Amino acid sequence: MLRIDSLRVTYGGAVQAVRGVTMEVPDGKVVAVLGSNGAGKSTLLRTISGTLSLHRGRVEEGTVRLDDVDLVRRDPGKIVRLGVVQVPEGRRIFSRLSVEENLRAGGLSSRDKAAKAKALQRVHDLFPVLKERGSQRGGLLSGGEQQMLAIGRALMTSPKLLLLDEPSLGLAPRIIGQIGEVIAEINRQGTSVLLVEQNATMALGVADLAYVLDVGEVSLSGDARELSQTDEVQRLYLGHGSETPQEERLTTGPRKTLSRWTA
Ligand SMILES: Nc1ncnc2c1ncn2[C@@H]1O[C@H](COP(=O)(O)OP(=O)(O)OP(=O)(O)O)[C@@H](O)[C@H]1O
Ligand SMILES: [Mg+2]
C-alpha cells in the first residue's frame, strides 16, 4: 500500500504545487487522479518516483510511504528497486533506439535474467505490436504505439505499483480505449496503478478509487463509480451535466476545476 500524508511540495520555494494532500493506493487497485492543468498531478507522481529534485521541486512537509518505507528524498533508482516505476508525461521513449532496445533499457536496473525474460514475455503478450516491430526505431511508431512502448518499458522492472502520467494525452478516442483496456489487464495481473488523467471517462472507467485535485488540494475523493455519478464530475469532467446550459459548457469547457469540497 502506498500512503501519502499531508504532502506539501513547492518549486523554487515559491510555487505551491501540492498543498497538503493525503491519499492512498491500496495494493491491487487502480486509483485515478483527475484534475485540470496545473492542479499538481505530475508533481504528485514526481514526488512518489523520487524525480522531483530533477525539476527543482522540494517536499516541504509530509510523508510518502510504500508499506513501511518513506520514499521522500530517496534515490529514484532505489524507488524503482522497491517496485515503483513512473511513465512520465509525454511518453519519453528513446526515438533513435529500436523498440527492443527501449524495452531492454527498462530492464537495466535488474540483474535477474529470468525475471527480465518473464517481464519481456509479459510485455509482448500485452502489446504484440512491440514484438512485431521490435527491430524498428522507436520514433517510427505511432503516438499510441509509443505510449504502449513507454508503458512496456516501465513494466520491464516488474513493478508492484505503476505510475502513469496522462497516458491518453493526444491520442484518438479508439486508442484511448485500448490504453484503458491495457491498464485494466495490467492491474488484473497484480500490479497496482496510480493513473493521472484529464480524460475522466477513461480514468473513471478503469479505476476503483479516484481523487480530484484542485490547485494542489484534494477536492473530491471516493469510489470511482460513485464519483462519476456526482453532479460536479458529470458536469465539469464528463461534460454532460443536466443543469449547465450548452453555451456555458462551450465557454468554460469540460475541464474547469471543481469548487472546493466542503463536506
Ligand atoms: N519545474 C517546475 N518549476 C516551477 N513550477 C512548476 C514546475 N513544474 C510544475 N510547476 C508548477 O506547479 C504547479 C503544478 O504543476 P503540475 O505539472 O504538477 O500540474 P499538472 O496537474 O500535472 O498539470 P498538467 O495537466 O498541465 O500536466 C503548476 O502551477 C505549475 O506551473
Ligand atoms: Mg502534468
Image: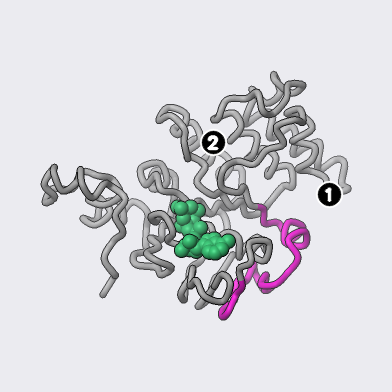
N-terminal-most mark, 1 or 2: 1
Q: Nearer the viewer, residue 142 or 64?
A: 142
Residue at (56% x, 47% y) in the render? 89
Q: Residues within 10 Å of mark 2 (few under 14, many from 20)?
A: some
Residue 223: percent from left, percent from top: 37, 58
Residue type marked 2: Val
Write the residue at 13% across / 48% down: 242
Is residue 187 among what the camera can see?
A: yes
Task: Judge from the rendering whether residue 153 lies leftward or rightward of residue 47; answer left or right.
Answer: right
Which type of secondary structure does the marked residue at label 1 adopt?
loop
**Identity, as a three-letter code, of the amino acid under mark 1:** Ser
Tag shown at residue 110: 1
Q: What is the spatial separation of the Cα atoms under label 1 and label 2, in whole angstroms?
A: 24 Å
Residue name at image x 50 percent, y 51 percent: 195
Please count the marks in the image: 2
Q: Is residue 43 visible?
A: no
Q: Classify mark 2: helix, strand or loop.
A: helix
Magenta range is: 58-85
In what quadrant of the picture does the C terminus appear?
bottom left
Choose top left, top right, bottom left or bottom right for residue 32.
Answer: bottom left
Residue found farthest to the top:
132
At 41% from the left edge and 54% from the top edge, which residue is drawn? 37
Residue 80 is a magenta residue: yes
Q: Quadrant of the N terminus?
A: bottom right
Give the quadrant of residue 46. bottom right
Whether ligand 2 has any atom under 8 Å from the Cβ at mark 2 is answered as no
Could you tell me if the residues under marks 1 and 2 are in contact, i.e. CB atoms within 8 Å? no
Q: Which mark is residue 38?
A: none
Residue 230: horizontal and vertical position, in percent?
A: 24, 56
Residue 227: x, y in percent? Answer: 31, 56
Query: To which residue does mark 2 refer?
Result: 182
Q: Is residue 92 left or right of residue 238?
A: right
